[in-house]
Amino acid sequence: MAKIQQSFVCQSCGAVYNRWRGRCEACNGWNTIVEETGATGPQTGPASTRPSRARGRVFPLEGLTGQAREAPRVPSGIAELDRVTGGGFVRGSVILIGGDPGIGKSTLLMQASAAMAGKGERVAYISGEEAVAQVRLRAERLGLADRAVELAAETNVEDIVETLSQGRPPALAIIDSIQTMWTETVESAPGTVTQVRGSAQALIRFAKTTGTAVILVGHVTKDGQIAGPRVVEHMVDAVASFEGDQGHHFRILRAMKNRFGPTDEIGVFEMTGAGLAEVPNPSALFLAGRDHAAPGTAVFAGMEGTRPLLVEIQALVAPSSLGMPRRAVVGWDPSRLAMVLAVLEAHGGIRLGTHDVYLTIAGGLRVAEPAADLAVAAALVSSLSGTALPAETVYFGEIGLSGAIRPVSQGAARLKEAQKLGFARAMTPQGRGEDGKQAIATETLRHIADLVAGIAADGPRRRVAGGGRGARREPEPD
């Protein structure tokens, strides 16, 4: 008989203790440790779900044929979703998708399931939060009520696996969401760390044995992390984050882990009245409506996975009367901004200690690569001097602590995307390592001082008259 073991598990990070504590030593969370009861031992779980030891088989690596080396994929019918997954859903894979409430996770998965069902594939949509009638209402709003998608409202994992095992194995099974599932092998409430881990294990085992691609929808915490134990992200084959701002009309699906494709790949969608629409050219979307003559704006040629992406970086440098000036950042790393400001003061001769600095990525996109340093520095210098940057110029390059501008990868792809959108000039670091003829005219920079001198030479230098908040900018006399 299985032995009953009492344990105390942190609901934030999954740390296990033998007694209750007020603060978790792993994540420093207060009042997050809950007592849970679980069965341990070799007979854990019902006999129908325990794998037989006699079924184990081994296969020689050299016996693989050329056709078996590439995992078979099932296209979802949505090009942006296939881009993030690496070309489609791999049979037997498990994908975990997280995102803020109301961001559009269920809408996207409903559209994907309807597209696959339209191709004759068996697709099952299991909802643990809504009734079947409520799921049908969403499908009718999206115009997908006539698709042959199997719907169910169930939270018991054993019942779900038993139902899906009847008949032809589904090509895709969507579990919305994993935090609402519970398994009979664990004696704890649904949503706890133990239940989430146990339910995920049962669904992953079902996917591997039947070849069904399973998508698990995960809730997120207040700091944007997927709720539940971190081990679930290690167990699944791919982890994707559905990002977006409620104030903007587009959404970004970002791959954070993918065993069968590239990581850091993104898919861009636009939220419309009929659901999520694909955005084949996101650079044009992010640059739409930009003011070419406004100081403090620079176009950054970035890379998101294998996709080049052009975004506008906006900076505002204003005089401050505070003893400690403000530093506000949206869409970029605040510590990275502090480093760029320090380099501009130490090696560029720019004094920003008495100015408020505001920086944002237009459109709500989050940029993480260091190649945006040069574009950020150009926007800051442009805002401080009041000189508008050339409208047909893009910037990319990493700034070192010595003020040197370091080369970045995939420079040719960045320049090609800039040429496609009508840009004629690029400010790039020296020695990008790209061979062949460049797509557009380039000007290489070695040091941050070269950037400052170039911006000062492009337009009239200005100074702040009077100082303080609301001061008027006037051209400096020659």
Image: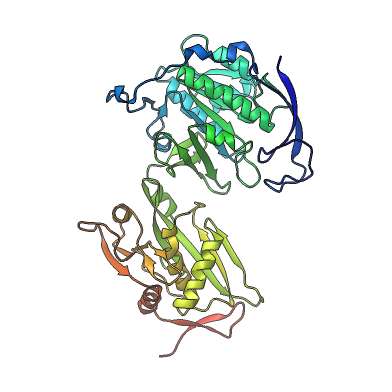
| As drawn, 350 above or below 269 | below
Q: Residue at x 36, y 79 (%)?
A: 457
Q: Position of residue 241 (x, y in %)?
A: 52, 40
| As drawn, 233 above or below 355 | above
| As drawn, 62 above or below 417 | above
Q: Position of residue 249 (x, y in %)?
A: 52, 45
Q: In the image as oriented, which residue stretches furthest toward the left?
A: 436
Q: Would residue 147 be visible to someone looking at this image? A: no
Question: Residue 216 is drawn in which quadrant?
Answer: top right
Q: Position of residue 327 (x, y in %)?
A: 59, 66
| As drawn, 168 above or below 397 | above
Which of the image's four quarters has the C terminus? bottom left
State how many labels appear: 0
Q: Would residue 477 be visible to someone looking at this image? A: yes
Question: Residue 179 is drawn in which quadrant?
Answer: top right
For this view, does 447 lie left or right of residue 443?
right
Q: Position of residue 230 (x, y in %)?
A: 59, 38
For this view, does 320 lie left or right of residue 274?
right
Color theme of the render: rainbow
Of residues 357 and 131, the one drawn nearer to the viewer in this rendering: 357
Q: Residue at x 33, y 70 (%)?
A: 445
For this view, does 241 lie left or right of residue 4?
left
Q: In the image as oriented, which residue stretches furthest toward the bottom?
A: 478
Question: Residue 1 is drawn in which quadrant?
Answer: top right
Q: In the image as oriented, which residue stretches furthest toward the top?
A: 167
Q: Residue at x 65, y 42 (%)?
A: 221
